[in-house]
Image: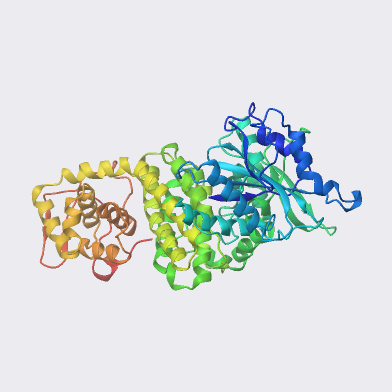
Amino acid sequence: MIPSVNPSGSDTRGLLYYLYETGKYEDHTDPHLVASFDGMSPDPGRDPNATLTDLKRLLDQPVMALAKHARPAKHVWHTSVRADPGDRTLTDEEWAGIARRIVAATGIDPGEGQSGCRWAAVRHADDHIHIVATLVTEDGHRPDDFRSGARAQAEARLIEKELGLHQVAPGDGTAAKRPTSAERHKAKRQGRERTAREELREAVRRAVAGARGDAEFFDRLAAAGLLIRKRAAPSGDLLGYKVALSDDLNRDGEPVFYPGARLAPDLSLPRLRERWSADAQDAPSAARPDAVRTGPGRPAAARRATASAVWQTVLVFEHGGDAVAAAHIAAAGEVLDALAKTSAAHARRELRDAATAFERASRSHVRAARGHDQALRQAARDLVQGGPALGRGEDGATTAMAIDMLFFLITAAARWHARRGHAQQAEAATRAAEHLRAAYQAAAAQPLGVLHQRGRRLSRPMLQRQTVLLREALPELAEQILTEPGWYALAATVAEAEAAGHDPAALLSEVAARRELGTADSVSDVLVWRMRRAADLPADASQLPETSTTTTRSTKRGTTTRSSAPGKRRSGADAARPSR
């Protein structure tokens, strides 16, 4: 159950008109009062003799009783209380009880002999009510409604438990501002899938991904078609910015601008500059040894570099302290935004939904130690500069590889948040992981299908030998892997790694030991991508020659291979060391 306290207004009748209007809004059906301050207020929805003006005059009476100069300019308090989509339909009596508890908890009408404000609760849909109050008490004072939004949320958590409703994770004040009811209705009238606020938040996040300074950030905003207003000090120093969609206009035909901080707390210019200043301070190390110099037409190289950066982050994620982990989580959000922006259509929707969900997980009260996240921020930059990827060939296969690595990082972030009691962030990261599963399935189907066919064409002696090798290298996982559909793809990958000169048993042990596999839908799939990344094998095997199956001989320990597939041979400790 979500109470949303809106900014105070000045037009009681205008708000009532919106609540009782049925012609413009499809979800406004049978508007009527379910409760009010005195239980006897006129109801324009059910009483043919009552009017909106009657109700307005009753609610405004304590305000109008004050001297004109003493009346508050913004005297209308308004909140909506919305049930979860999975909740049962509540009765009018239950909604009435909820309304009374909300106005009491927020200080609007505290009860227990204390003077309260006049209010009315209107229901015009099955799943929510609106509460309207005027912010002058019966004895002419201002109510004690400080932090009414937080107080309404706390009361809603109690109501959920008592009525057996879906229990919403408690917030911590770090969430982005929700679209207002007016913004949602405006989007619906305009045929938009999302509100302007939500579209702008996503566009700004994408412009941030991997950016290194003000100029690059604003260039990206302009390239995305956003209108930009910059706020400067008298000295000329830039202090902030606002953005708008060119086709989102107010009643005067002017664009509606949103400051970055109103889109999300971490999108204010000072918070963005924290990322960029860390980039500048860490510039030498930001050019990491395995950095890919990407450009248009090289999305596959960017994705392989991203998989490496994410893999290394997974290995150190929980060992650098909370501030370092928070930096990695925030930077992972940039990688998701960049990947969603540049991926092919068949995976883009799920990646976009993953990035949108993870946005909530990227902020908490743990302040990020910027500078430790440079590998991930560089990966986001590589993705943007690498350009759009095709959904096939090496582009599609490396997209699957990158998503596979990201899934484990996002899952680790969900656990990190859960252990620290960050309920909303943990839930958001879990939802993002589910979208990544779906995106992975879309991206991996073709390249894994190719590997599966290659594996099935391996000779029976080679498959038998690799089965033995698997049982020796991974005795606890072998039987599970052998029953998975992905076993043939893994067998083909092992054959390629061996042909390229790697010790396959050592490589299998290496990639399996680096991180848990319990959250994987298919262990064999995970091992395929880890091995192909570590052994520097092409992610897309469709253009490779078939691995030789007639000239391979094995010894009791290690292998000696002669194959038609090219590759530099490595053995011993070098074979177990991932290539970059």
Q: Visible in this render: residue 287?
A: no
Q: Visible in this render: residue 462?
A: yes
Furthest residue in direction left, as rendered = 461
Report the residue at 53% width, 53% height from top. 359
Q: In this view, does 477 lie to the left or right of 272?
A: left
Q: Is residue 186 left or right of residue 348?
A: right
Percent across and percent down for residue 421 are 48, 66
Report the residue at 18% width, 52% height from top. 563
Q: In this view, does 435 lie to the left or right of 247?
A: left
Where is the C terminus found, in terms of image quarters? bottom left
Percent across and percent down for residue 296 are 51, 44
Q: Nearer the viewer, residue 462 or 251?
A: 251
Q: Nearer the viewer, residue 549 or 233?
A: 233
Report the residue at 20% width, 61% height from top. 477
Percent across and percent down for residue 432 are 44, 51
Furthest residue in direction top, as rendered = 23
Q: In this view, does 299 lie to the left or right of 174?
A: left
Report the residue at 40% width, 58% height from top. 411
**Res 545 → quadrant:** top left
Percent across and percent down for residue 289 are 46, 64
**Colour mode of the rendering:** rainbow
Q: Nearer the viewer, residue 387 or 49?
A: 49
Looking at the image, residue 24 lies above or below residue 104: above
Number of callouts in the render?
0
